[in-house]
Amino acid sequence: MKMRNPPVNSLSLEFLTELLISLEKLESDKAFHAIILTSDCPGIFSAGLDLMEMCGRDPTHYAEYWKAVQELWLRFYLSHLVVISAINGVNAAGGCLLALSCDYRVLADNPKYAMGLNETLLGIIAPFWFKDTLVNTVGHRTAERALQLGLLFPPAEALQVGMVDKVVPEDQVLSAARSELAQWLAIPGHARQLTKSLMRKPTADRLLKERDADIQNFVRFISRDAIQKALRVYLEKLKQKKT
Ligand SMILES: CCCCCCCCCCC/C=C/C(=O)SCCNC(=O)CCNC(=O)[C@H](O)C(C)(C)COP(=O)(O)OP(=O)(O)OC[C@H]1O[C@@H](n2cnc3c(N)ncnc32)[C@H](O)[C@@H]1OP(=O)(O)O
């Protein structure tokens, strides 16, 4: 699955919906057993959630957007397919969440390709299920420091803290993902799938039980004047970079 939403693969409502439909199609086709998730945007895996969806819109839109973000995470996190990410670019916040929801992560060795949950740098916070997904991957202490400081880890550090499983030269990222896949596909499917569910269901259940409350919290939080201002300032900084 090659993500293509130029220029930065931001996860707009339309793009989230496309990803969700693609994933559902693959999952319902018995011929498919695995997905390699990668990017078609040079140097960028994903810039994360689309800030334009969270800025200057009305509460109904925020609720619809957040429901789609929840849906995509649940679908990826609990997918019965083997999902491996071949991370071939910088990967921030919501994009990093997608990669963390995969079963295995290969990252291209380029110091520009940092990844992490950098929400605090924007003046916002990672919701509990983003946090839980990170804790499940790197452990509590590393996650706490990474989340508070909004750290984006370059490849060597991402590997060292366990945020990715392998770092390879840029031109080998897809072939390394394919080689890894062979090991996962060699395991009897039902046993691997049940084990994945055993490991992940408690984390997913937490959101499933509190979905509506989580949407309301998001809408309340993102609608605050101070948060809207912080997002506008961040977007402005991104644009000023060019001048
Ligand atoms: C009580 C508690 C309740 C809890 C409630 C929850 C609270 C909210 C939770 C929200 C969680 C948010 C998750 C996110 O994912 S937020 C997004 C974080 N992403 C980033 O910080 C990355 C930002 N982008 C960049 O750093 C760079 O763009 C990047 C390194 C990815 C690429 O750099 P490059 O130089 O190649 O490209 P540009 O910066 O020039 O960008 C090109 C254009 O794209 C626009 N852009 C970039 N990122 C985004 C984005 N995420 N959304 C929308 N648009 C984006 C950028 O502005 C440029 O636009 P223009 O061409 O028009 O200038």
Image (tube, rainbow, N blue to C red):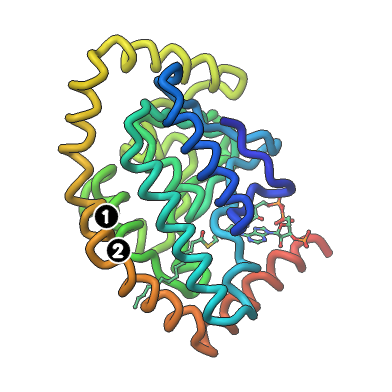
From the viewer's side, name the closer residue of 124 and 61.
61
From the viewer's side, name the closer residue of 41 and 202.
202
Where is residue 192 shown, x and y percent of the image?
A: 22, 23
Q: Residue at x 17, y 30 (%)?
A: 195
- 118 left or right of 230 in image: left
Which numbered circle lies on residue 132? 1
Does 29 appear above or below 59?
above
Element on which disc 2 rests? helix
Rendering quarter of residue 137:
top left
The Cα–Cα distance between marks 2 and 1, rounded to whole angstroms, is 6 Å
Q: Residue at x 69, y 46 (%)?
A: 5
Where is residue 133 shown, x and y percent of the image?
A: 30, 50
The image quadrant where one finds the N terminus is top right
Element on which disc 1 rests? helix
- 220 left or right of 204 in image: right
Rendering quarter of residue 40:
top right
Tags 2 and 1 in contact by the CB under 8 Å rule? yes
Ligand 1 within 8 Å of the CB at mark 2: yes
Where is residue 178 shown, x and y percent of the image?
A: 47, 15
Does 77 appear above or below 169?
below
The residue singled out by tag 2 in the image is: 128
From the viewer's side, name the closer residue of 33 and 44.
33
Does 231 appear above or below 167?
below
Q: Residue at x 39, y 63 (%)?
A: 149
Residue type, label 1: Asp
Q: Farthest residue in the bottom direction? A: 225
Residue type, label 2: Phe
